[in-house]
Image (cartoon, grey):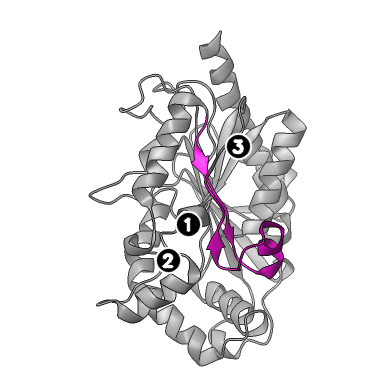
Amino acid sequence: MAALRLALAVRARLTRSSIAPPCPETPDHRRHRLESGAGTSTVKRTFETIFRREGITAATIEGDAFHRYERKEMKERIAAADREMSHFGPEANEWAELEKQFGNYARDGRCRTRLYLHNDAEAAPWKQEAGTFTPWHDTPVDTDLLFYEGLHGCVKTGEVDLARRVDLKIGVVPIINLEWIQKIHRDTKERGYSKEAVADTILRRMHDYIHYVCPQFGETDINFQRVPVVDTSNPFIARDIPTAGESMTVIRFRNPRGIDFPYLLSMIGESFMSRANTIVVPGGKMDLAMQLILTPMILRLMEIRRAQLA
């Protein structure tokens, strides 16, 4: 299973009338943040297109950078753990450090990050093994916003509250059986695991998925959920991953006030309203929908930034 998050920050303090209130720890909240969740390639590409077209310079950090353990040690920890342990939960992640870096960017316009090297191709330029971290480094100077992509940008526990530090929170996630189909295909075809081993991983992650991933989608400003229109009732016998053309995307707004639904319906063919705060679009038009919806929101954050820096 996988769920994506993204975060965006801008050099200005948000006001009560904007998308989210400023963080109480950072009264000089000079930067804003956005947050998003799993259709990773489409979402990241869409944001990169918006940034390039609008002349916005983003600092980017990835959620994998804030895992607690490298791959070898993670396997050892899982084997020795008293309860089921996964990358979805607190034991395997540095959530306090991630929240600290969100705060640093809000205050100073820079934060610290690193890379997790997933495979040999990523590790080769660093002359490291796959499954290891690169050294920590600072994000570039003079960026306009912070863009976070990962699993935990809206996590709230007794110790951390990342959701309050994000100015625009966007969740992107497929329905659960589609998530499983994607994982099964990736892990069996690209990583050499058996279906039984993948099933064990899904079961091991379930507690953390329910307690730490699902609740984040109640914190988001917008959710994009991909729903196949083909049979996915048994993910373990699915021969192919449903394509975008075999899917619909359900888009839910936490606060639909100010959203021009007639405009969206006119611009996105075959779209329709399913609820007062929900629009459904063909899966192949998710990128268009995201650009139409998110561009004005990002530009609004930039306008606030310019006004408060003036």
Identify the residue under disc 2.
Answer: 87
What is the CA distance from the residue labelled 2 to the residue labelled 3?
A: 24 Å
**Are the two marked residues, 2 and 1, in contact with CB atoms closer than 8 angstroms?**
yes
Residue that label 1 marks: 151
Residue drawn at the location 38% of the way across and 53% of the way down? 94
Q: CA distance from mark 2 to mark 1?
A: 9 Å
Residue 298 position within the rendered picture, expressed as x and y whole percent measured from the top left: 60, 32
Residue denoted by label 3: 59
Nearer-N-terminus badge (3/1): 3
| Mark 2 Cα-neighbour bin, 10 Å: few <14, some 14–19, many ≥20 | some
Whether label 3 touches label 1, CB < 8 Å? no
Specify start and end residues of the magenta stretch as a single range.
110-136
- The amino acid at mark 1 is Leu
**29 versus 239 height, above or below:** above
Q: Residue furthest front?
A: 127
Mark 1 secondary-structure assignment: loop
Q: Position of residue 184 (x, y in %)?
A: 58, 81
Which residue is at 73% across, 60% downward? 284
Image x and y of residue 296, in percent: 63, 31
Residue located 47% across and 22% down the image: 30
Q: Would residue 118 be counted in the magenta stretch?
A: yes
Between disc 2 and disc 1, whose residue precedes?
A: 2
User: Horizontal and vertical percent for residue 205?
Assistant: 39, 74
Q: Amino acid at mark 3?
A: Ala
Which part of the image, by quadrant, shows the C terminus? Answer: top right
Q: Pointer 3: residues within 10 angstroms few (<14), some, or many (20+)?
A: many
